[in-house]
Amino acid sequence: MRFRKREEKLQDVDMSPLIDMVFILLIFFMVSTTFVKDMKLDLDRPSASSASKASSKVIRIYIDKIGDIYVDQQPVKVWAIQGKMRDLLRMSTAKSVLVVTDESVQAQRLIDVIDQCRSAGAKDVAVATNREV
């Protein structure tokens, strides 16, 4: 009996189908993904000569030109600010609030927002301004 040695062939794995599938999945996720836009309000902030830089840890409240109020990038009514701020201040280490407002906003609207923030337990409430040159 004669035994033959088998010649072992090295088999190559064809990577082209795998690469095709990766590109198809990439295209699928690119098309199906929704992108979240940051809140960009066009505000003309008031100016002040005593302006200083605010901490990045403060909670920010935005009041736009028409008087709409935004907390945590969601529109909020004046009467609901206190509840929303209590939740945010409970999770925050710094108990500070920065109100970013347009210079055309009525003073009463700004005072209402500041009062609601202080009632919620904020220690420091400041208004964002531009530094005068």
Image (cartoon, helix red, strand yellow):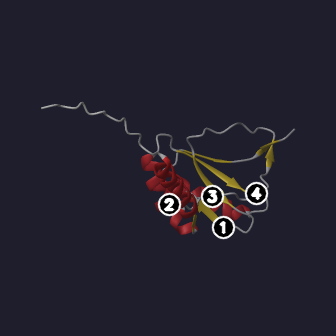
Measure the C-alpha gap from mark 4 to mark 3.
17 Å
User: In the rendered structure, which disc, 4 or 3, sits on the residue that comes first in sequence?
Assistant: 3
Residue sitting nearer the eye, 40 or 5 = 5
Disc 4 secondary structure class: loop
Position of residue 12 in the picture relative to residue 64 (left or right): left
Residue sitting nearer the eye, 9 or 33 = 9
Residue 75 horizontal/vertical position (percent): 58, 66
Residue found at the far right of this picture: 133
Residue 105 horizontal/vertical position (percent): 74, 63
For disc 4, the neighbor class at 10 Å (few under 14, some 14 to 19, many from 20) is some
Residue sitting nearer the eye, 118 or 74 = 74
Residue kind at label 4, given as amino acid type: Leu
Do labels 3 and 1 touch, CB within 8 Å?
no
For disc 2, the neighbor class at 10 Å (few under 14, some 14 to 19, many from 20) is many
User: In the rendered structure, which disc, 1 or 4, sits on the residue that comes first in sequence?
Assistant: 4
Disc 1 secondary structure class: loop
- Which quadrant holds the C terminus? top right
The residue where tag 1 is placed is 68
Position of residue 78 in the picture relative to residue 103 (left or right): left
Mark 2, mark 3: which one is toward the viewer?
3
User: In the rendered structure, which disc, 3 or 1, sits on the residue that comes first in sequence?
Assistant: 3
**Label ID, residue 37:** 3
Do labels 2 and 3 touch, CB within 8 Å?
no
Measure the C-alpha gap from mark 3 to mark 1.
19 Å
Residue sitting nearer the eye, 9 or 54 = 9
Do labels 1 and 2 touch, CB within 8 Å?
no
The residue where tag 2 is placed is 82
Residue kind at label 3, given as amino acid type: Lys
- Which quadrant holds the N terminus? top left
Mark 4, mark 3: which one is toward the viewer?
3
Mark 3, mark 1: which one is toward the viewer?
3
